[in-house]
Image (tube, rainbow, N blue to C red):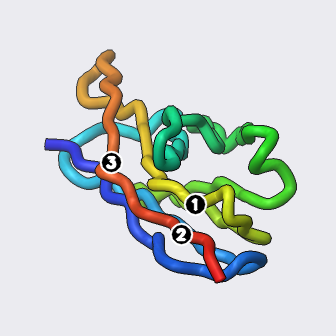
Amino acid sequence: QVQLVESGGGLVQPGGSLRLSCAASGTFFSINTVGWYRQAPGKQRELVAVITSGASANYADSAKGRFTISRDNAKNTVYLQMNSLKAEDTAVYYCHAYIQTGQATFMPFWGKGTLVTVSS
């Protein structure tokens, strides 16, 4: 059974940094595209950053220049480095991945999220 587990969230002051991790476990062939999403209280879930299997990355406008998504395929882990954090970055951050579970089968998986709170 495949699981995605996020970690690295917490309380940070404005201007600070955090690095989130998304680790995949279980039995699978490979991890394809992975995205970090976030959901603030009272708001819809939104895409923050996405990285393909070839390590090509794209970012939401709100994340450009401040966040960096990366992956370590040997560790089955994707990271989100977040710098210059602002109060409006406060949200639960979720990892989503398309994972190859069969010869020609890619399934979507969500993690349970990690809370990031930016406050002084």
Question: Separation of disc 2 and disc 1 at Cα?
Answer: 5 Å
Marked residue nearer the N-terminal end (1 or 3): 1
Marked residue nearer the N-terminal end (2 or 3): 3
- Name the kind of residue labelled 3 in the image: Gly
Question: Separation of disc 2 and disc 3 at Cα?
Answer: 18 Å
Residue 92 relative to residue 16: left or right: left
Residue depicted at 72% across the width and 76% down the height: 14
Q: Residue furthest front?
A: 42
Q: Residues within 10 Å of mark 2 (few under 14, many from 20)?
A: many
- Quadrant of the rendered image containing residue 97: top left
Give 23 or 31, whichever is nearer the viewer: 23
Residue where numbered disc 2 is placed: 117
Q: Residues within 10 Å of mark 1 (few under 14, many from 20)?
A: many
- Name the kind of residue labelled 2 in the image: Thr
Q: How many numbered tags mark residues here?
A: 3
Q: Are marks 2 and 1 in contact (CB under 8 Å)?
A: yes
Residue 81 relative to residue 11: left or right: right
Residue where numbered disc 1 is placed: 90
Q: Where is residue 16 drawn, in percent x and y?
A: 71, 80
Give 85 or 111, whichever is nearer the viewer: 85
